[in-house]
Image (tube, rainbow, N blue to C red):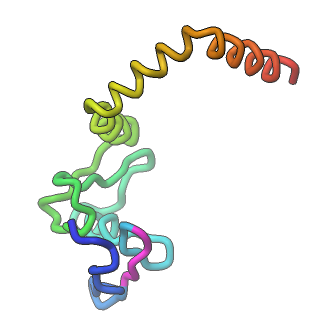
Amino acid sequence: MPEHSDRPRFVLFQGKKFWRSGPYYQRTGKRLHRAIWESVHGPIDPGCDIHHINHDKDDNRIENLACLKRFDHLSHHGKLKTGPPCRAAIEACKLWHATDAGRVWHREHYESVTRH
């Protein structure tokens, strides 16, 4: 995927400009990939997200878009973040939480939360 600075400032869809905003193109709060999906399939059900199948947010071809329940979409992306670097961090956290410092932190955090 190209860097955001390499992308056009806007793209046209159905005669309307969608402006670059972070990793997406938007127009008055509507993201381009959602507008494209709706132009083919109609309104998106509440609780659903439009997912870029190949994970390239610049690739808004209809065949690269899928409508997923929000939970399934978030679960999918969560699984992508559990590769070896994340597993190593999780294991390091487990070790830290078992130390005296980790137990003290949890005790203090628990007490601050339960006071309210």
Q: Is residue 100 above or below residue 40?
A: above
Q: Kindly identify the residue that appears in the image at 39 percent across and 19 percent down.
A: 91
In this orientation, does residue 63 appear? yes
Residue in front for this viewpoint, 41 or 55: 55
Instruction: Return the x and y of residue 12 as percentages of the image width and height.
Output: 28, 87
Instruction: Return the x and y of residue 31 as percentages of the image width and height.
Output: 39, 69
Q: How many discs appear?
A: 0
Q: Quadrant of residue 83?
A: top left
94 in magenta: no
Q: Kindly identify the residue that appears in the image at 16 percent across and 68 percent down.
A: 61
Residue furthest to the front? 100
In this orientation, does residue 72 appear? no
Q: Quadrant of the C terminus?
A: top right
Q: Is residue 103 above or below residue 21?
A: above
Q: Kindly identify the residue that appears in the image at 35 percent across and 60 percent down.
A: 43
Instruction: Return the x and y of residue 28 as percentages of the image width and height.
Output: 50, 78
Left or right? Give the position of 38 relative to 60: right
Q: Quadrant of residue 54?
A: bottom left
Residue in front for this viewpoint, 3 or 88: 88
Part of the protein shown in magenta:
18-22
Q: Is residue 80 above or below residue 58?
A: above
Instruction: Return the x and y of residue 102 as percentages of the image width and height.
Output: 62, 15
Q: Kindly identify the residue that appears in the image at 33 percent across and 79 percent down.
A: 5
Secondary structure mainly formed by the magenta segment: strand
